[in-house]
Image: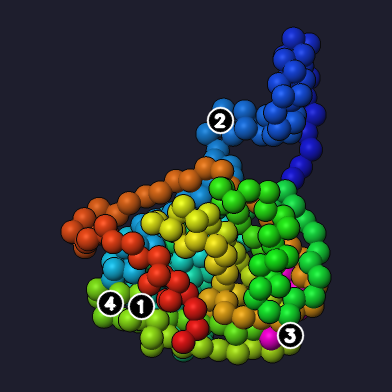
Amino acid sequence: MVQISADIPASLKTALDEKAARSGGVSSIVTTALARFLEEPIHTIFQVSTSGALVRGVDDREVSVKTLLEHGDFGLGTFADLDGEMAVIEGRAYQIHGTGRVSEPSPDAGAPFAVVTRFEPNIDVSTGPVGRFKDLEASCDAFRRSGNIFYALRLDGRFKKVRARAVNPAKGGTGLVDAAKAQSEFSFADLEGTLIGLWSPGFSSAFSVPGYHFHFLSADRQHGGHLLDLAADPLRLRVEPLTNFHLVLPETEAFLKADLSEDTTAQLAYAEKAH
């Protein structure tokens, strides 16, 4: 966050103070007003397709990496035909292949599902030591003031161990559960890295991944994957509440004809875990 100063009429200052006393403070009001005037989205998730569609095997190209990066500089997803995990950080996208190799995809590479945001955290703290995934969740829970909005979370530091996975390329139309049965799992030890994370509320299970969803990327950009478990020294944690949600639904034949009426929560939970 940065500070600015400006000269404004006394009448506006009075109105601003009165509004700030009733709501989120001067900074929040000014930020919101500037974002609307400049048509610059803030605290906004940009999501392509739905988790339910991915579970149902709608995994063709729906958006390019170039387009995703025009809407956010931080986030996660997957690639067409479930060809690995996507991690977006500091405006660059990375593809974590099922072989364990990490590469930067071409701007034209396609994704069937992805979630990105322009990361502007308002919380910057240190966690305690993390011994397992549940400790990570507890550390992050302390900085979520609501269970009804979304959060972007970034954690940086030294990891004693990381267990991660990456899906392998699948035949078109392969459901996420079947693809997860053939996923590759990796174990890393004693390395610097970053967790790129999102937390989604329970009501979003029809279109998102409820709860915590983390992808790991090493500092040298050589290792990564969908996080399964970890142990780490104290980590730097940055958090941004996300209160605007922009969902783009595909117009491809596969999506338009897919039966997305069934609750896929259980199948999604299975696919997100180790096997």
Side of 105 relative to 120 (left or right): left
What amino acid type is highlighted by mark number 3? Answer: Lys
Residue 50 x %, y %? 37, 58
Secondary structure of residue under mark 4: loop
Residue occupying image coordinates x 55% and y 38%: 40
User: How are the colours assigned in the image?
Assistant: rainbow
Residue 237 colored in magenta in the image: no
Kindly indicate whether the residue at mark 1 contacts the one at mark 3 (C-beta within 8 angstroms): no
Mark 3 highlights which residue?
160
248 or 271: nearer the viewer: 271
What amino acid type is highlighted by mark number 4? Answer: Thr
Mark 4 highlights which residue?
174
Q: Which residues are magenta?
A: 156-161
Mark 4 and mark 1: Cα distance apart in space: 8 Å
Residue 177 has which mark? 1
28 or 176: nearer the viewer: 176
Q: Callout 1 environment at 10 Å: few (<14), some (14 to 19), or many (20+)?
A: some
What amino acid type is highlighted by mark number 2? Answer: Arg
Mark 1 and mark 2: Cα distance apart in space: 41 Å
To which quarter of the image does residue 270 belong?
A: bottom left
List the single residue furthest toward the top: 11
Mark 2 highlights which residue?
36
- Which label lies toward us, 3 or 2? 3
Secondary structure of residue under mark 3: strand
Residue 69 x %, y %? 49, 56
